[in-house]
């Protein structure tokens, strides 16, 4: 039998990410060069970094097509012959990130390669040149030199998809062919302009970036605070800055990144029950005349005896109203899972989760040890989404522990409630699920987007008959309407109306 | 014996199924009575939206594909319902039975009735699978989406009375009997102040039945997928099916299949990837992009295949102007060659590329010039999900 050694080559991570990306290994020829009757077809998780590889053992000799699926949606493909003689190493190139400090963001799919943007812009320039050539009166084609393309790419990569529509518009209005494609938006051109108004704005312009502390004992206040700019400004006026982190800022004009190091994970708020709670940390960033508020996933891990993980916040296009904000946790066990979760690639997240289960990592995350409950919640959300047939019997206990052991963590209660709702057999199951949802609401805005969505849907289910659930649902739905559903961690944007 | 077709005017296909089945509803809203050109009192809340021609075409094709092609060993096709909003009440002919139906026109009341009947038919069996395809105008705000129906804007005080509220719709359905629920919303996800101000607007159609699933051991699996990302448009061509509809048919035909325990299934695992790949194959021709998106997910086996899947294969020449002189065939083992393009055949027309479906396996693609004296050009390739692009290098033949 043959053996493959697979890895994704990614520089500047500072470590090998064991659970990096998902790869599919498909046999397309047997040793005789024929299409196999029963082709080998496996999904494996391969590491990202410079050294570590993933061994795929006991595969029949033949030819394989191997696809590495990155969280960005890119698929890297290789065809490789495998013999019985010796292991074959296959290395995928992740593509360089434009700056070393963007390496984790590149792995998480938040930043494309510089090369991708150069290619795209080159294609566009080619079309422009063709169009110019097609005109009889055009004396010579438009020539776009490489330096220009590179500089345009450097400009473009930072604003990613936000800039894409601008280029699309540009391309559509050039005298070039579209192959007949047009948008339903062409049949549905634009939306009505927003009415002008004397919009309320923040009384004092917020700084570009700050970390603000929220008291877990007043977690419910945050639901109201996020409802509008005035309520936010009022809440913010009373809230202190978060003291437990140090922040380093990097930027290259188009992109700004803050590296947040957890300097003190022992910060806590005393409670009547005697169980200290970690204060909530919010990232607050100026966006035009409004703000972005991100639920920063810390403490990560909770266990202060384990090394703290750096969290990165990436902002495109400065403090303008456009551009994405993305959060990446530099945790080599969890970064892949969270990236796939954020991008909606749940099948890949599930493959990663299965691999983690196989290697025992999932037991560590979800078992009663719980040294990192925030990571455990990510695993729980993926596990619930990809539930097939009967759920593992241990899940209910694990999720109950996740709910009950961490009074400050709304997502633990949400995951537990969702699992109960999906598998409810009795009225008591529903009652318990409702109690968990209400508990989650009282713990404040969930860390994860998936949690916010589940909380909204769960409370809605009971809101016809339960007045408290209805009131909670309305507030959750209001926040959800300002939340970016395509981020792993909750990010709420409050803009003037 | 009651006539199900008389009770539900949206029903266009029904088969007696013993055990769990697949229940499909397809909604294509192109004509909007109260948008400009709709023929009825124009709404001031028109949002600059226009009449659409692609959604009914898309809906017809999707419905026809299910009736003609959908087979599933685990959950065979039980029924197909169809709602079409065209300027005049639309007719649809079921190609299997030859019966012609006048289908509902897509007002909220008609859509509610069709949706209710669709779900009622599944009430006896929790293992049933329901599948919805919607194509029409859409609005978006955060995690909420609103899908506009034919009578959007009829009520000037509450124009969204003629719209479907995505969150409430799914929330209600999550408490109903069928455990496998798949939805494909092929609509723009454009942000708009009216959606932001009325995020709870529109109609959910299904109220929550708190205890609706008690006693059902199967977990509820809902998998809603959007044809495009948030804040982006869905693409289509006037009077042709949308990119997503075409991609969905290819995906369901076998492109996004997966082998599980030696059985091939069309699953949701690769649905996003397949829709995105197929949509972008065409979108890039207009320098655009359309990525499918999902905020929540469930692993569903939408179709269990009886054998190996058929995979879309796209064949093109590196020099398109030689198409009229080139015969393209594909060979597999000792089988006779299969013709992909033959310019000498009746009705042949030049295309940028030819699409065919092939079973997984090893193939030899061949281009032969109909002019004498030129060596055939061949290309060996393996056909495997999701699709295969074959390019035959004939430029060496000269002009």
Image: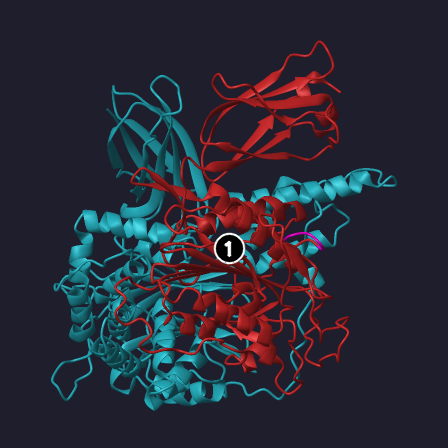
Chain colours: A cyan, B red
Residue that lies at the very extreme toward the front in this rendered image: B1
- Residue A264 belongs to the span the image colors magenta: no
Pick whichever, A80 or B36, lies toward us: B36
Kindly identify which chain the residue marked by label 1 belongs to.
Answer: B
Residue A266, x across and y down, in percent: 18, 73
Q: Give the range drawn in magenta.
A: B238-242
Q: Can residue B289 be seen in this view?
A: no
> What residue sits 53% from the left and 50% below the top?
B66
Pick whichever, A418 or A276, lies toward us: A418
Q: Is residue A39 visible?
A: yes
Pick whichever, A448 or B247, lies toward us: B247
Q: Is the magenta stretch mostly helix, strand or loop?
A: loop
Label 1: few (<14), some (14–19) or many (≥20) C-alpha neighbours in 10 Å: many
Residue B383, x across and y down, in percent: 47, 31
Residue that lies at the very extreme toward the right in this rendered image: A137
Q: Mark 1 points at which residue?
A: B292
- The image quarter in which residue B234 lies: bottom right
Q: Which element type, helix, strand or loop, lies under badge 1?
A: loop
Count every numbered label the image shows and give the total.
Answer: 1
> What residue sits 38% from the left and 76% below the top?
A456
- From what the image shows, is residue A168 above or below residue B336? below
- From what the image shows, is residue B48 above or below residue B223? below
């Amino acid at each position: 039998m043959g053996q493959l050694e697979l890895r994704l080559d990614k520089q500047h991570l500072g470590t090998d990410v064991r659970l990096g990306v998902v790869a599919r290994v498909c046999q397309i020829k047997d040793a005789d060069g024929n299409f196999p009757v029963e082709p080998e077809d496996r999904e494996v998780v391969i590491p990202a970094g410079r050294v570590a590889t993933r061994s795929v053992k006991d595969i029949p000799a033949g030819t394989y097509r191997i696809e590495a699926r990155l969280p960005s949606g890119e698929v890297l493909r290789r065809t490789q012959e495998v013999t019985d003689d010796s292991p074959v190493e296959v290395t995928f190139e992740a593509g360089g990130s434009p700056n070393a400090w963007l390496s984790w963001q590149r792995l998480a799919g938040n930043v494309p390669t510089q090369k991708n943007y150069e290619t795209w812009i080159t294609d566009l320039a080619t079309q422009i040149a063709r169009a110019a050539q097609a005109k009889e009166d055009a004396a010579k084609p438009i020539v776009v030199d490489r330096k220009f393309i590179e500089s345009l790419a450097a400009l473009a990569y930072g604003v990613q998809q936000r800039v894409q529509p601008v280029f699309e518009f540009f391309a559509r209005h050039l005298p070039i062919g579209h192959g007949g494609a047009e948008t339903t938006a062409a049949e549905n051109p634009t939306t009505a302009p927003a009415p002008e108004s004397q919009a309320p704005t923040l009384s004092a312009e917020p700084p570009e970036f700050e970390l603000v502390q929220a008291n877990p004992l007043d977690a419910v206040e945050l639901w109201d605070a996020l409802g509008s700019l005035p309520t936010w400004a009022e809440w913010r006026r009373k809230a202190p800055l978060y003291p437990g982190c140090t922040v380093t800022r990097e930027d290259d004009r188009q992109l700004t990144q803050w590296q947040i190091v957890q300097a003190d994970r022992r910060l806590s708020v005393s409670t009547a029950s005697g169980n200290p709670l970690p204060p909530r940390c919010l990232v607050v960033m100026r966006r035009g005349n409004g703000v972005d508020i991100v639920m920063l996933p810390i403490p990560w891990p909770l266990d202060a005896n384990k090394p703290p993980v750096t969290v990165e916040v990436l902002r495109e296009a400065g403090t303008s109203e456009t551009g994405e904000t993305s959060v990446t946790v530099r945790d080599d066990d969890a970064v892949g899972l969270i990236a796939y979760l954020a991008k909606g690639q749940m099948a890949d997240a599930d493959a990663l989760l299965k691999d983690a289960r196989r290697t025992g990592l999932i037991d560590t995350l979800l078992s009663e040890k719980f040294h990192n409950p925030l990571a455990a919640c990510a695993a729980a959300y993926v596990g619930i989404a990809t539930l097939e047939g009967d759920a593992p019997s241990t899940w209910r206990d694990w999720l109950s522990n996740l709910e009950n052991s961490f009074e400050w963590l709304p997502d633990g209660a949400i995951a537990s409630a969702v699992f109960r709702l999906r598998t409810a057999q009795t009225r008591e199951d529903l009652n318990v699920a409702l109690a968990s949802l209400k508990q989650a609401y009282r713990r404040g805005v969930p860390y994860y987007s998936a949690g916010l969505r589940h909380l909204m849907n769960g409370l809605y289910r009971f809101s016809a008959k339960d007045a408290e659930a209805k009131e909670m649902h309305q507030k959750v739905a209001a926040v959800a309407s300002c939340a970016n559903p395509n981020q792993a961690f909750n990010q709420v944007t409050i803009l003037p109306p | 014996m009651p006539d199900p077709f008389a009770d539900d005017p949206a029903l266009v296909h029904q088969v007696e199924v013993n055990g769990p089945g697949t229940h499909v509803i397809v909604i294509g809203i192109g004509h909007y009575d109260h948008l400009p050109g709709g023929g009825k009192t124009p709404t001031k809340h028109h949002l600059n939206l226009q009449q659409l021609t692609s959604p009914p075409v898309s809906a017809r094709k999707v419905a026809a594909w299910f009736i003609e092609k959908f087979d599933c060993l685990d959950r065979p096709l039980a029924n197909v319902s169809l709602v079409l909003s065209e300027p005049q009440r639309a007719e649809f002919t079921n190609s299997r039975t030859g019966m012609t139906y006048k289908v509902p026109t897509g007002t909220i009341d008609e859509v509610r009735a069709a949706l209710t009947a669709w779900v009622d038919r599944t009430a006896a069996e929790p293992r049933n699978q329901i599948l919805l395809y919607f194509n029409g105008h859409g609005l978006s705000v955060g995690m909420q989406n609103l899908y506009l129906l034919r009578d959007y804007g009829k009520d000037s005080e509450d124009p969204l009375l003629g719209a479907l509220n995505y969150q409430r719709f799914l929330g209600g359905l999550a408490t109903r009997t069928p455990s496998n629920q798949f939805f494909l919303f092929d609509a723009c996800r454009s942000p708009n102040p009216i959606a932001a101000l009325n995020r709870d607007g529109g109609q959910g159609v299904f109220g929550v039945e708190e205890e609706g699933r008690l006693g059902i051991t199967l977990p509820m699996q809902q998998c809603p997928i959007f044809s495009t990302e948030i804040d982006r448009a869905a693409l289509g061509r006037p009077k042709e099916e949308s990119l997503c509809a075409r991609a969905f048919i290819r995906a369901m035909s076998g492109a996004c299949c997966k082998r599980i325990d030696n059985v091939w299934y069309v699953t949701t695992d690769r649905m996003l990837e397949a829709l995105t790949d197929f949509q972008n194959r065409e979108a890039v021709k207009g320098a655009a992009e359309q990525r499918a998106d999902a905020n929540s997910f469930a692993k569903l086996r939408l179709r269990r295949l009886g054998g190996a899947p058929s995979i879309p294969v796209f064949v093109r020449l590196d020099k398109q102007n030689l198409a009229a002189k080139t015969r393209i065939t594909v060979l597999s083992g000792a089988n006779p060659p299969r013709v992909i393009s033959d310019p000498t055949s009746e009705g042949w027309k030049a295309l940028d590329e030819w699409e065919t479906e092939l079973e997984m396996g090893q193939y030899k693609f061949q281009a032969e010039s109909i002019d004498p004296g030129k060596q055939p050009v061949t290309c060996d390739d393996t056909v495997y999900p999701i699709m295969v692009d074959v390019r035959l290098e004939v430029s060496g033949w000269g002009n």
